[in-house]
Image (cartoon, helix red, strand yellow):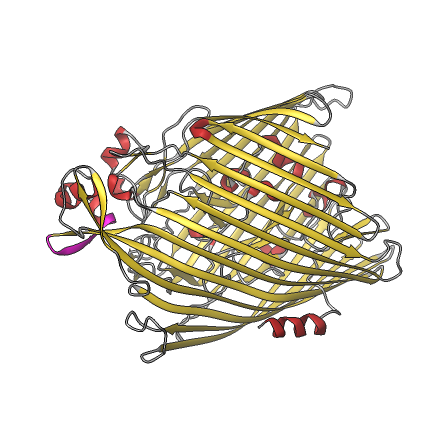
Amino acid sequence: MKNIIALCLLALTGFSFAQNSESQDDLALNDTVRRLEGVTVNADVLVGSKFKAKNRAGSTYFISPEELKIFNYTDINRILRAVPGVNIVEEEGFGLRPSIGLRGTSPSRASKITIMEDGILIAPAPYSAPAAYYFPTANRIQSFEILKGGSQIQYGPYTTGGAINMVSNQIPSKFSGRVVASMGSFDTKNTYVNVGDNFKNFGYLVEYNNRNSEGFKTIDFSKKTTGYNGNDYVAKFRVNTNPEAKMFQSLTLKAQLSNEYSDETYLGLTQSDFDKNPYRRYLSSEADKIDTKHDQLMLTHLFIPVDYLTVTTKAYRNNFKRNWYKLHDVNVGGSNVSLASILDNPEDNQAGYDIITGAVNTADNALRVRNNNRGYLAEGIQTVLNFKLNSEVVNHDIDFGIRYHLDSEDRFQWDDRYKIQNNALFRTATGTPGTQDNRVESAEAVSAHILYNLTFKKFTFSPGIRYENIIRRSLNYGTADLDRTGENLNRRQNRTEEYIPGFGVLYKINDSYTAFTSLHKGFSPPGVNDEDKGESSMNYEAGFRFAKKALNGEIIAFYNDFNRLQGADTNAAGGTGTGDLFNAGAAQVQGLEVLVSYDLLNDENSKFKLPITFSYTLTDTELKNNFESDTEAWGEIEAGDEIPYIAKNQFSIIAGLEHKKFNISISGKYNDQFRTVAGQGSIPDNELVKSNFIVDASAKYHLTEKVSLMSNIVNLLDIEYAVSRVPAGLRPGMPFGIHFGITAQF
């Protein structure tokens, strides 16, 4: 495989996977960057600035470095809370393994959107197992780019809801460094350090980040903590020709290594227990933990032979290993009983409830704890040629890109058995690795795209098409062939070829007002069975942007028409965890996104600024077919049912007071109630996650231009709220927490 990648890299040096964009000062001269007549070319970005985002013929949102520093969040869920069209389902309160959807796509483990870091796919196995059990550490991310509608056609394979690109901290333009250190509630600590420098023909950046916490939940009869500890290391090194060279080239190596250990579980609480104490954890989950390791190597070659042509090639390899050791079910009277059925109806499952809570001594092997042991590999090479030719009347901007990608998921799982004796958990049997699941699923994909942005006077036309050629394979060795001799090997294969067109139009009415519309085909890769079909939809949007003095914003209406919606059998969604995909039939998702920002003071001579930002999302979903699924979140479907885990109404409001010496900000997010099982009409209590309004606050005082004291508060009003009911019981959101810290740069 290494030879294949090396050959492809040599063969494709005439192209680039172009993350080229105009930029403002927030991206400066940095990693794989070349300035050309006021335009900054950065090989890691898709958008690059708010200005660029507002001039695309499709919904685009850019979170700048300055915005990220306001609250200094380490939780991706909170970072994205103000972005219209984003659906988030929290899990453990820290944002370690996010569930994110865009425009009504299933948020489960962010597996239905394209997740990227520095323009490359970053999910553990983007085609064969995209669930986001790994997610980049927010502290080392410089900016976030969220693309929906026609803006995302270049960045598959998931083109229904949208794409998120995280731009990592870049090599600085001169010797500099940054330190961020904070501590607070639940003995939570965060330490981030970076240092870098830039010379005429060489640049570097090294980073270290540690996050840890004792957690905010308490396990019955136990002194064990429920927190986490994670480390992240990154190094970037760049060599380049002289900046003034006629044919500029740079080569950047990025190496990343991270590990995380967290005492997390899928086991929640019954409604009655949650109402009494939402931060309780049952004794049966005491052994639950997840241990992960991720490493990445990425090589980026930037080539600018002439000012109007940019060529960027990226070769990458991501490894991710994890073992989520967690309670799977309990044995009651000789039969295995699911956790969900017990917690959903404890009165009718009293014996099982007593086992889970540790209220009784159990027989040996009464509790089954599964080693969900999996290894992931994703590697490939991608390249894009970007051509820009501008005149006084017409501007041409053409992207042509191609990517060759391989990924795989290796499941080698087993079960251990436990008992409860005198309010303590004991292991009674150790399983043999591979005896629960022993299979490898993989994908090989060739994709290409071409996008043409033609600007003529006040119009910008953006036709484009994406091509995906995917081969999915499965090798199931069976639980008896632990040496993988292939004696009873079960092979499956599925090949898909898909063309994904899109078209957008932007009309600049004047300097203050812009209108745009787009349509594109939505697609998600199919499963491994030869009868599986990829998700398919036609998606439409129309929007209006305005910027008048201190007031600016946008209003966007969207409509996604699915002729083939796709669901997945995952543990996170209450299924069996096979990962198999299924066809959920026809569906419609429609909605409205509103974003408005205004400076209440609006005075250039004032020493203060008082900005306020309001965002609102309406999402209405409807399934059009009857069908039956084994996954709890879908269940038995009737036409007219709503898609589960999608809140109909969301809004956020952020207000700040800014001065040269200090900043104070407050943020509130409302999340409407949502159902955990597809249905219609009023939501049954045992399928309901109630609405909530959570307020955060932050403050920063600048001791000098380089050193600042900071504090932030999450859940200022200390609201007790549930974030999930699937896969097994109710789980709480983060309670009130306060953190203090210092940030310094040199």
Q: Image height check: is 50 above or below 2?
A: above
Q: Is residue 159 visible?
A: no
- The residue closer to the viewer here, 461 or 324, is 324
Tally of marks: 0
Q: Which residues are magenta?
A: 333-340
Residue 50 on image: x %, y %: 69, 43
Residue 356 on image: x %, y %: 21, 43
- The residue closer to the viewer here, 54 or 505, is 54
Q: Is residue 13 visible?
A: yes
Residue beneath the point at 40% across and 37% down: 227
Q: Which of the image's four quarters has the N terminus? A: bottom right
Residue 301 on image: x %, y %: 73, 61
Residue 130 on image: x %, y %: 47, 59
- The residue closer to the viewer here, 377 or 455, is 377
Residue 746 position by quadrant: top right
Left or right relative to 651: residue 431: left
Q: Image height check: is 406 above or below 649?
A: below
Left or right relative to 18: residue 185: left
Q: Image height check: is 345 above or below 492?
A: above
Residue beneath the point at 59% across and 59% down: 519
Residue found farthest to the left: 333
